Amino acid sequence: MQRLESHSGRCSPINFRSDFCWLLFAFFSILAHQACALRMSNATYIQSNANVSFPITAKEEYVVFSGNTTQQSQQLIASLLSMLDARDIAEYGGPYTGPQFWLVQMNSAQISGLLKSIPGAEVYKNAVVAQRQMKYASTPNSAAYNVSGQLNIDNSDIIYQENAPPDLKVVSWPDDKDLDDSDFLKYYAYDKNGGQNSVIYVVENGIDPDNEEFVFNPVSWRYAPGAVATPTDDDSDHGTCVASKAAGYRFGVSKRTPLMVLKSSLSFADVLWAFQVIVNDLGALPALRVVVLLAFSSIHSNRVRTNVIPQPWRRVRTLMLQAISRNAVFVVVSGNKRNGLEHQFVDGYPAYFAYPQFGSVPLTLVGAVDNAGLEAPFSRQSAYITAWAPGMNAECAHMFGPSLYNGTSMSSGMVAGLAAYLLGFPNPPFDIGGGKTAYNFNKYLRETASWQRSSEGVPRVIWNLQDGSSIQPLLNISDTLAASDIAHS
Ligand SMILES: *[C@@H]1O[C@H](CO)[C@@H](O)[C@H](O)[C@H]1NC(C)=O
Ligand SMILES: *[C@@H]1O[C@H](CO)[C@@H](O)[C@H](O)[C@H]1NC(C)=O
Ligand SMILES: *[C@@H]1O[C@H](CO)[C@@H](O)[C@H](O)[C@H]1NC(C)=O
Ligand SMILES: *[C@@H]1O[C@H](CO)[C@@H](O)[C@H](O)[C@H]1NC(C)=O
Ligand SMILES: *[C@@H]1O[C@H](CO)[C@@H](O)[C@H](O)[C@H]1NC(C)=O
Ligand SMILES: *[C@@H]1O[C@H](CO)[C@@H](O)[C@H](O)[C@H]1NC(C)=O
């Protein structure tokens, strides 16, 4: 049996995909050590004595939970070991939570035996439970956004990205400028001190770390039980795009925030694994300023509108609350509409956790607008949206070159970028710590780091408090930073 955080030789030290010298290197090194310190210990294999009394199906993969006491957990482990080959059991958890769940290969008879003999045990098929939120086709964009168009005037802390995509420029659109102002959307302006003391956890089926977008980000990597390494590690056609909106050099809000890629499918076990890793990391490194980008939503929507969270998602919620109490900020899509009225509104997890009947979890719920600040027609509605961000014809990185996309995923990437940018200042503009970071960030986002772009539109759209409408003096650009200068500045 493989214990805690390890599975079939995948517990390798975290793999750094780009060179950098930076404080988080030390952080991540500790994390790598931590993960592998939990490496498998061979447990005793006990001969099966299960009472097999009905037809045995083929083995399939299940997620198993014990009751919530230590004794129940120990009973469950003993029972699993008594019934199954130790190779068919992997245990996940961490030093701060204890064992949380087991990923087990078993058949129907074994499930039955387990449920009969272990009070409080729960077994779920390890099915796909969510989908990513970028359903609209992309169109390639020929506009060249190169990395040399980032201007630093008079050696101030503010960088002006001249050739930024229009959706990104919206983020530094100051609140005293009208849409028809001729200076509108001239630059994306940002403070170079932002985003450097935070980290974005990207729960995706990989990103392409060799994409030009991530040349300045330290990118580190971990694999969920259901994920495998592939040559580019960009398997979903989604992760690279969404991550580039958060922290890409050309397309992203926070240019150099390190990325922690939790490469995972959207199976129940992989989703749980990702939340568990985040809780474990925050337990080991309480000072880490973590933003988690969750651009997915549950498949089985709560159409009946009961107030009962399905048990698998209740487990996810528990882990999310633990991470929030350890000061993580979760950025979650409201989701893309599908056909039919029943899909007009948010009706999936984890977005639903923001609702009062599901506990008013202080996650950051994101809807999509166009570049004029009007609600995107595909964006799911909700009274609990925290922030709106561009997600219509938004430009992002893609394995075949820059592309335009529609989707709340792009919006959530930008909000995660803004969260990381603000949290990553040496002194963030709101109080952090004490389990209140997410709440305080949301309050700041609602009250300060957003404003209503369109007089007709209700949404308050994210703003990074900079003015990208013009640079004074524009004619004397003292310092056009080359990419290599920026990397080492
Ligand atoms: C676990 O078992 C494997 C294979 O039987 C063996 O090679 C390994 O040394 C054992 N590990 C420990 C920690 O006992
Ligand atoms: C095994 O199950 C059968 C059918 O449910 C039952 O009659 C029998 O007593 C059980 N045997 C043991 C050892 O539990
Ligand atoms: C354990 O579960 C029971 C039943 O669901 C619940 O009443 C109890 O509060 C839980 N205890 C802890 C420590 O979570
Ligand atoms: C990069 O972008 C800037 C600003 O748009 C442009 O002036 C410059 O020619 C571009 N450089 C390259 C190498 O494409
Ligand atoms: C995004 O949606 C708008 C409005 O439906 C549409 O005009 C545009 O072509 C879409 N863009 C992409 C990239 O699909
Ligand atoms: C830009 O500034 C430099 C140094 O202050 C000065 O020598 C130069 O003439 C200025 N150029 C323009 C176009 O104003």
Image (cartoon, grey):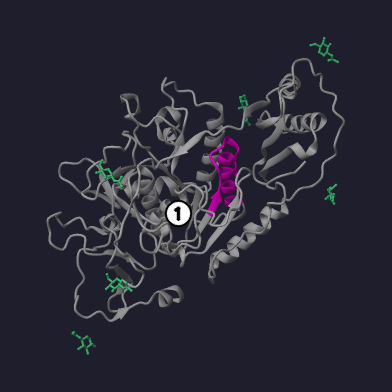
Q: Look at mark 1 in the image and give the residue it sits on.
A: 240
Tell me if the residue at label 1 has its CB under 8 Å from ligand 5.
no
Bounds of the magenta segment? 261-283
Depth check: give the residue in front, 460 or 140.
140
User: From what the image shows, is residue 408 above or below residue 146?
Assistant: above
Indicate the quadrant of ligand 2 in the picture.
top right
Secondary structure mostly seen in magenta is helix
Q: How many marks?
A: 1
Q: Residue at x 60, y 38 (%)?
A: 269
Q: Residues within 10 Å of mark 1 (few under 14, many from 20)?
A: many
- Say what amino acid the circle numbered 1 marks: Thr
260 sits left or right of 8 in the view: left
447 sits left or right of 95 in the view: left
Q: Position of residue 139 (x, y in %)?
A: 32, 50
Depth check: give the residue in front, 337 or 260.
337
Q: Position of residue 110 (x, y in %)?
A: 75, 24
Q: Quadrant of residue 381?
A: top left
User: From what the image shows, is residue 487 above or below residue 172?
Assistant: below
Mark 1 lies on a secondary structure that is helix
User: From what the image shows, is residue 112 above or below residue 486?
Assistant: above
- Asked whether 262 falls inside the magenta stretch, the response is yes
**Is the N terminus in the top left, top right, bottom left or bottom right quadrant?**
top right
Q: Residue at x 70, y 34 (%)?
A: 104
Q: Position of residue 53 (x, y in %)?
A: 78, 15
